[in-house]
Amino acid sequence: MKYILFPFHLLWSIWCALVFFTLAFAMFPFLYLGVSFGGPKTIRRMHFLPCYVAELTLFLWGIRIEEHNKELIDEHQQFIFVGNHRSYMDALISGTVIKNYKKYIGKAEILKWPVLGYLLDKLYIPVHRDDKDHRAWSMDQLYVKAKEGASIVLFPEGTCNNTKEHLKKFHDGAFKLAIPTKLPIAVFTIIGAGELWPRDTILIKPGKIIVYWSEIIKMDEYTSVENDMEKLKEKVRETMKPYLEKHYPNGY
């Protein structure tokens, strides 16, 4: 069956690419002018423009998002947003469902990409994952942006999870940031993205994505990075696990 559907998936993926690049290049002049010549308020507003474009992109891709427990998230509050990661689409999904003023951290290789590279350089925080010193610099930048009032969006698995396990091992960054800043963690679990755009293919399919929000994790009982970070990691994993087990009882 997949061979019969392949031409349709290929044509749809070409459409998706045309949509993405058309919207990205249409956005770029406004983004460039706002970031290059605008004041602090204008630059802050520019953070929302890519999110509106992400929402329109997913709509034109035929992606429908079904959210659960959205009432748990105050759009005017500052959080560290933490989600699972199985698809390149996750950045678009999180940009669409998270309405808060936010910063992302992204791999520095994107700096070489047209439009996306400029966006990462001006609005978000790049990181060279294989460079220990640069990772430390990126972590410092996260502290600075958090102190300035931005929410931070992180995928603690790092790269897309393409294993059969529900979750890969978590990196430390989100938790090293949450404990000393005392920012609450808002956990979101994405279901379906890995099926519609798996990491190992360029083919994109239309369909439904489910996003589950969980009860906010407050930092009251987490006081020490050294002593409490692993406990906090496990708390986040246990928060995501019921939703993943519900949809993937036997793993992916």
Image: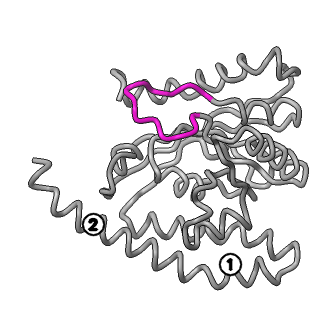
Q: Residues within 10 Å of mark 1 (few under 14, many from 20)?
A: many
Q: State the image coordinates of residue 209 (x, y, percent, origin top left).
A: 42, 49
* Nearest to the observer: residue 150 or residue 72: 150
Residue at image coords 58%, 38%: 158
What label does residue 12 carry, if any? 2
First along the sequence among labels 2 and 1 = 2
Judged by its main secondary structure, the magenta piece is: loop
- Would residue 192 appear left or right of 154 to someone viewing this image? left
Q: Report how far apart the C-alphas of labels 2 and 1 lie in the structure.
A: 28 Å
Q: Are marks 2 and 1 in contact (CB under 8 Å)?
A: no
Q: Which element carries disc 1, helix, strand or loop?
A: helix
Q: Is residue 213 magenta?
A: no
Residue at image coords 47%, 68%: 57
Residue at image coords 55%, 29%: 240
* Residue 46 lies in quadrant: bottom right
What label does residue 122 carry, if any? none
Q: Residues within 10 Å of mark 2 (few under 14, many from 20)?
A: some
Q: Is residue 39 above or below residue 222?
A: below
Which residue has dot 1 on it?
Answer: 31
- Would residue 193 appear left or right of 10 to someone viewing this image? right
Q: State the image coordinates of residue 174 (x, y, percent, origin top left).
A: 72, 36
**Magenta stretch, residue numbers:** 157-170
Q: State the image coordinates of residue 116 (x, y, percent, origin top left).
A: 58, 67
Q: Is residue 238 above or below residue 96?
A: above
Residue at image coords 41%, 57%: 64
**Amino acid type, label 1:** Leu
**Amino acid type, label 2:** Trp
Q: State the image coordinates of residue 23 (x, y, percent, origin top left).
A: 50, 77
* Residue 165 lies in quadrant: top left
Q: Which element carries disc 2, helix, strand or loop?
A: helix
* Nearest to the observer: residue 56 or residue 36: 36
* Residue 14 lies in quadrant: bottom left
